[in-house]
Image: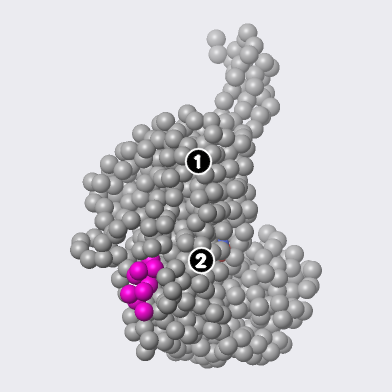
Amino acid sequence: MTVPAHDELVTETAAILSRLGVHDLPRTGAGLIARSPVTGGELARVHAHTAAEVADIVGAASEAFRQWRAVPGPVRGQLVRELGELLREHKADLGALVSIEAGKIRSEGLGEVQEMIDICDLAVGQSRQLFGLTIASERPGHRMMEQWHPLGVVGVISAFNFPVAVWSWNAALAFVCGDAVVWKPSEKTLLTALACQALLAEAARRVGAPEGLSALVLGGAEVGEALVDDPRVALISATGSTRMGKAVAPRVAARFGRLLLELGGNNAAVVAPSADLDLAVRGIVFSAAGTAGQRCTTLRRVIVHESIADDLVARIKAAYETLPIGSPLAIGGTPGSAGVAAEGVLVGPLIDQASYEGYVAALDKAQANGGTLVAGGARVLADQAPDAYYVQPALVRMPTQSEIVRAETFAPILYVMTYADFDEALAMHNEVPQGLSSSIFTLNLREAEQFISAAGSDCGIANVNIGPSGAEIGGAFGGEKETGGGRESGSDAWKAYMRRATNTVNYSTDLPLAQGVQFG
Ligand code: UN1
């Protein structure tokens, strides 16, 4: 697989950005550096905000919120409808930009934009369904009800690995719920954020939404802290590592702000003796090696019955040994070729050197803990792209679920452990600090139902005969324990972006008090 020449990548990126409404970014000078993991080279420079600028942006967003909350929900939905239309129109370019900046293979870059379109569709419908309840009052001539009101400014902090979809899950719902959004994207994916903001600005212009309703703040920890600490930000929705969550959560809690956390996962698949192994292997390989192991839902642990373990491991190993690794896009030759998928490539690069170092350190530790490397584990293409980090997905058999297995390493490493009885498998499954996604491969109805029951998987997502990654947006997305407890996207996740008011209305001529209290 060939890695494109960096200069051609830079030219293509500038052309794509311009079609998306982002023009003339400098290549040198002050500011934040945008890079591509495909080549490891620099793409452009981007303005870095100061804490004072963040405060001004939040101020403008608060002002926009005051106007926007008075716009009827279904009318607010039109903003998101326009965004969805623009995303459909620009899907090829935005998907290519995701591949360039996050290193995703072509179909996954496009898939991420599709996820944005899907949440826009959902949110537009939701804009007509922002409903509360009517509740029976104990008092005659009284009616009790609840309403959902717009919340305020929502601060969105997102990670590099879903550089555009996670923003859209939050933003699409927040806008229909009547909120303003200030977004701090990962410093590793600045260009995709600029492109989304440009598309949103165009949608806002078309519907006449207030100035400042959607804004970006770009920079490092100082910018993040300014956003997190600002009392005018009603909700912080943060996606990233558990370490990041531990830094953000106490600061927001200290000012009684609301939190929606989507943190680390350590997702497992239990593979039972009755499993359809062909299906299980396909599910496992996609979930573990797809996105180069850089999804929060990536499969990191297989807990397989001892009677089929050797067979399953041999099959995963065979699949791993033929996985095409390389540049996601076949850039080069003809202008405009950035949208062309590199033939057959299924595994793109890691995001950066630190990520590669984490992969190497985890594999060393696993082997020091008695693990056996069965497949993969090496860097490739270093001769062609010395500044990029392409690695073979690694398959490691572990004697026990040791410390390194219990930690989330954001790279393609799959640990395999065995079990003898089903209760042991469930106990091992839940015996990690994280609780995002989970899966079981079995044709045994009792095992399947037990796995998704109250006494089964303790994760926010529990699947049967599907791997743990690749959730649809219609369901609530998120997890328990160190994953942070937040829920985004479908089901009733919209309620996180609104505040609930309970109203009691007395339409009688009397004033009965609740609980039978007599006063005077
Ligand atoms: C993430 O990795 O932060 O379920 C989100 C999935 C995707 C979302 C992943 N729909 O894998």
81 vs 387, left or right, is right
Q: Is residue 363 magenta?
A: no
Q: Along the polypeptide, which appears first: circle 2 or circle 1?
A: 1
Q: Position of residue 408 (x, y in %)?
A: 47, 72
Q: Give the residue displayed 56% in from the left and 69% down from the top.
A: 107
User: What's drawn in magenta, residue-wise?
Assistant: 5-13
What SS does tag 1 mark? helix
48 vs 123, left or right, is left
Q: Quadrant of residue 282?
A: bottom right
Q: Give the residue displayed 41% in from the left and 87% down from the top.
A: 381
Q: Position of residue 149 (x, y in %)?
A: 51, 33
Viewer-proximal residue among 242 and 290: 290
Residue identifier under label 1: 79
What SS does tag 2 mark? helix
Kindly tell me whether residue 423 is visible in this rendering: no
Kind of residue at disc 2: Gly
Q: Quadrant of ligand 1?
A: bottom right
Kind of residue at disc 1: Leu
**Label 1 near ligand 1 (CB < 8 Å):** no
Kindly tell me whether residue 91 is visible in this rendering: yes
Viewer-proximal residue among 43 and 407: 43
Q: Residues within 10 Å of mark 1 (few under 14, many from 20)?
A: many
Q: Quadrant of residue 350?
A: bottom left
Q: Main secondary structure of the magenta part?
A: helix
In this rendering, is residue 13 above or below 73?
below
189 vs 47, left or right, is right
Viewer-proximal residue among 16 and 357: 16
Q: Give the residue displayed 74% in from the left and 68% down from the top.
A: 448
The mark total stands at: 2
Q: Are marks 2 and 1 in contact (CB under 8 Å)?
A: no
Residue identifier under label 2: 109
Q: Position of residue 210 (x, y in %)?
A: 40, 35
